[in-house]
Image (tube, rainbow, N blue to C red):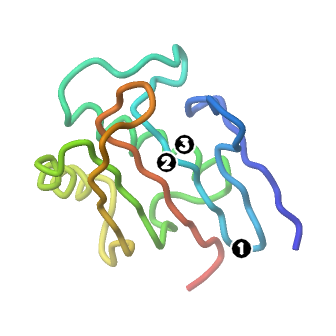
């Protein structure tokens, strides 16, 4: 099956050897997003909530470039340098997702690129029911 890379200027550009997302059939694999501002490639200023919102906005931009939206995400992986922020992720997530929520994992990690405190990647299915 063909693999199609997805790219948009509305999300941070890849800072390594990867695509923002790759589509294979009706499935889109979204690479991890950290709270970078697409226009400047600098971390978003502000508190943890601002970082979480920036990550969701970045994921939404990549999903849109692939022809979908956050509503099409079936699996979400969340990486946090402090699992104490897990409740805040849940709170902010309700502004971006509606039931049925995607399957999800939250993992505590020692460090993330660019000293981010949160990173998320996702799997999206298009055209499904």
Q: Position of residue 46 (x, y in %)?
A: 22, 21
Judging by the rendered image, the residue that carries numbered circle 1 is 26
Q: Position of residue 36 (x, y in %)?
A: 45, 26
Q: Indicate the secondary structure of the residue bearing disc 3.
A: helix
Dots 1, 3 in contact, CB < 8 A = no
User: Is residue 27 rendered to the left or right of residue 54?
Assistant: right
Judging by the rendered image, the residue that carries numbered circle 2 is 60
Q: Is residue 125 above or below residue 78?
A: below
The label shown at residue 120 is: none
User: Is residue 104 rendered to the left or right of residue 1?
Assistant: left
3D distance between C-alphas at marks 2 and 3: 4 Å
Number of marks drawn: 3
Q: Quadrant of residue 49?
A: top left
Is disc 1 surrounded by few (<14), some (14 to 19) or many (20+) residues within 10 Å? Answer: few
Q: Quadrant of residue 3?
A: bottom right
Dots 2, 3 in contact, CB < 8 A = yes
Query: At x 60% / y 59%, what residue is drawn?
Result: 68
Query: At x 17% / y 51%, what residue is drawn?
Result: 83
């Amino acid at each position: 099956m063909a693999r199609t890379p997805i790219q948009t200027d509305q999300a941070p550009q890849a800072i390594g050897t990867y695509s923002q997302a790759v589509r294979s059939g009706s499935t889109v694999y979204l690479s991890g997003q950290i709270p970078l501002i697409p226009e400047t490639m600098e971390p978003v200023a502000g508190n943890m909530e601002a970082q979480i919102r920036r990550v969701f906005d970045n994921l939404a931009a990549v999903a849109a470039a692939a022809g979908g939206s956050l509503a099409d995400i079936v699996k979400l992986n969340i990486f946090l340098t402090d699992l104490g922020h897990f409740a805040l992720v849940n709170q902010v997530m309700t502004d971006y997702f509606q039931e049925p929520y995607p399957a999800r994992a939250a993992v505590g990690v020692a460090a993330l690129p660019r000293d981010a405190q949160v990173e998320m990647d996702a799997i999206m299915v298009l055209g499904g029911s």
